Amino acid sequence: MSDLTTSPAVINYINRLFKDYYTNHPVSNIVDISTREFGVGAFGQKISKRHLAFSNLKSFNDYLKTNTPFFVSYSVGYYKYPDRRPMENKQLTGADIVYEFDVDDFNLPCQDRHNVWVCKDPSCGDYGYGNKEFCETCKKPAKITQWTCDEGLDKVKSETIRLINFLESEFKLDPSTFIISFSGSKGYHVRITDKSIIPLSKSARLQLMNYIFAVSLDLEKLGFKTIGKKRFCPDINNSKGWSKKIIDYIYNLFSNSTAKDLENSLNISKKQAILLYDHKQTILKQMIHNNILWNDFRNSNKLWDKITSKAVDDLRLKIDPQSSSDIYKIMRVPDTIHGGTGFLSTSIKDIDSLKEFDAFSDPVVLRSEKIKKVKLLQITPKFRLLKEIYGPYEVNDIIEVPEHVAVFLVLKGVAKFE
Ligand SMILES: [Zn+2]
Ligand SMILES: [Zn+2]
C-alpha cells in the first residue's frame, strides 16, 4: 500500500465512495455483536484503532457511515466487556474458530509470474516481475507487491471447500453456523460459530487443528502396520477419520491410475510403475478382502511408505494451525470494504455459492461508469475486474479506466490519480 502518493483530497474522495456504499448496504452478518471487540484501519494501515465495541447493529452501521474506516475487523472472542483494556479486563467468555486461507500460503508458481518487486534503494530503483525479496541488481531488500489471479484464488477456494467438508463430516459441526467470506483481497475466511466449539480452551483448539492438518499422525495407530513380513492396512469398509481418508486415497490411486499416472504421481521408475499396474487387481483385492498392502516385490516397503506419506500430504489442509487457535485476534467483518482493494469482503451463503463465487467480479461493489485518469507508479501485470482485462502496464503509463479500476489501483498503491 502506498504511503507517499496519497493526498488528503484523495482519501476524502475514497471515503465518500465508502460512505455512499455503507449508506445503502447495512452490514448484518455478525454473531453476538455486543460481545465483540472491533478494530478499524486507516489508509494503508489495517489496524489503527482497537478495543471498540457496539451494542447493536444500528450503532455499528452508524459508525461505518460516519467514520468510513478503510478496514473493519471484529474479534474471534466473545467478551463480557469488549471495550475494556488490557485484554484480561475484557473477560473472555468463549471464542469462534476462524480459518484463513490466503494465496501467499500456497507457494504457487503463478506468484512468480505476476508479483512485482521494486528495489527499496531509490538510487538503484530496479524492478521486475517475480516474488523476489532482494533486488536482482544490487541485492538490497526489495518490496513485493502481490497480485492475485484466477488460478491462485481457485486453488485457495478448493482448499476452503475441503476444509468445510472436513468440518462437517468429521466433527459433525452445523454448517449453518459457518460464516464463509471472501477476504476482500487474497483469500477466504471461514468462521465457525457452532455452540459446541465456543467454550474450547486454547489447547483443545490446537489439538483440533493438529487433527485437521494431520500434524504428527501415528500411522500405526491408524492401522498401517507391519507384522512379520506382512503390511497391514485399515479395513476400508469399517474405518473412519484419517484411517479411512488414507486408505480411500490409496484405493482410488490404484483404481483410477494408468501406469504412466503412477510413474508421475509417485515419482517412481517406469519399471516399478508397470509392475504395480500389472498387479493392480491383486493390490485392490488384498486391500479390500485381507486388509493387506500387497508387498511381494523388491523394495516394496519403501514404496508403501512413500505412498502413505504422499496420501497424508495430499489430504492434509495447508494452513498454519497456530493461526487458527489464536482466540484474541480480530478478523475482517464480512460485507465491509477492504481498503487495500476497494473490494467487498463478501459474505458467501454456503458451499454451493462458494463454488460459484467470482473473486474478481462479485466483490467489486464500487462499480461506476465514470472514467478516471491514473498514472502507474510501478509495472502492473494483466488483471481482470468484472469481465474486462486490464494491463499489463509500464511505469509512468497514464491510463483512463472506470472509476472502480482506478480506485483499486490507487488503494493497492500502484497508481495515483492524475
Ligand atoms: Zn537495487
Ligand atoms: Zn496467481
Image (spheres, rainbow, N blue to C red):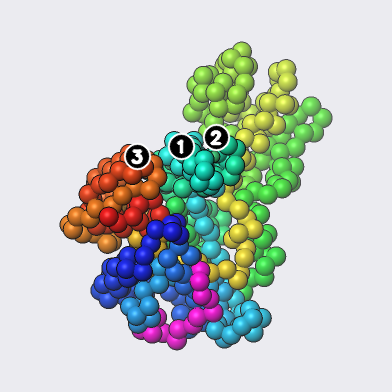
- Binning the other alpha carbons within 10 Å of mark 2 as few (below 14), some (14 to 19) or many (20 upward) gives some
Distance CA(mark 1)–CA(mark 3): 11 Å
Q: Look at the numbered disc 1 and give the secondary structure of its residue.
A: strand
- Residue 381: give x, y in percent of width and height: 37, 40
Q: Residues within 10 Å of mark 3 (few under 14, many from 20)?
A: some
Callout 2: SS: loop
Residue 136 lies, with reference to residue 221, above or below; the image says above
Report the residue at 45% width, 37% height from top. Answer: 129
Q: CA distance from mark 3 to mark 2?
A: 18 Å
Task: State the residue in front, 117 or 224.
Answer: 117
User: Residue tagged by mark 2?
Assistant: 136
Q: From the viewer's perspective, tell me whether residue 122 is left or right of residue 377.
A: right
Q: Which quadrant, please, contains the C terminus?
A: bottom left
- Residue where numbered disc 3 is placed: 394
Q: Nearer the viewer, residue 198 or 340?
A: 340
Is there a contact, CB below 8 Å, between mark 1 and mark 3?
no
Query: What's the residue type where badge 1 is placed?
Result: Gly
Q: Residue at x 62, y 63 (%)?
A: 325
Ligand 1 resides in the quarter of the picture at top right
- The reply to whether residue 7 is visible in this rendering is yes
Which tag, 3 or 2, sits closer to the chain's start? 2
Q: Check contact, mark 2 vs mark 1: CB within 8 A.
A: yes
Q: Which residue is mark 1?
A: 128
Q: Considering depth in this image, is 296 or 138 the residue closer to the camera?
A: 138
State the extent of the magenta-drawn residues as a range.
Answer: 46-61
Report the amino acid beneath label 2. Glu
Q: Is mark 3 within 8 Å of ligand 1?
A: no
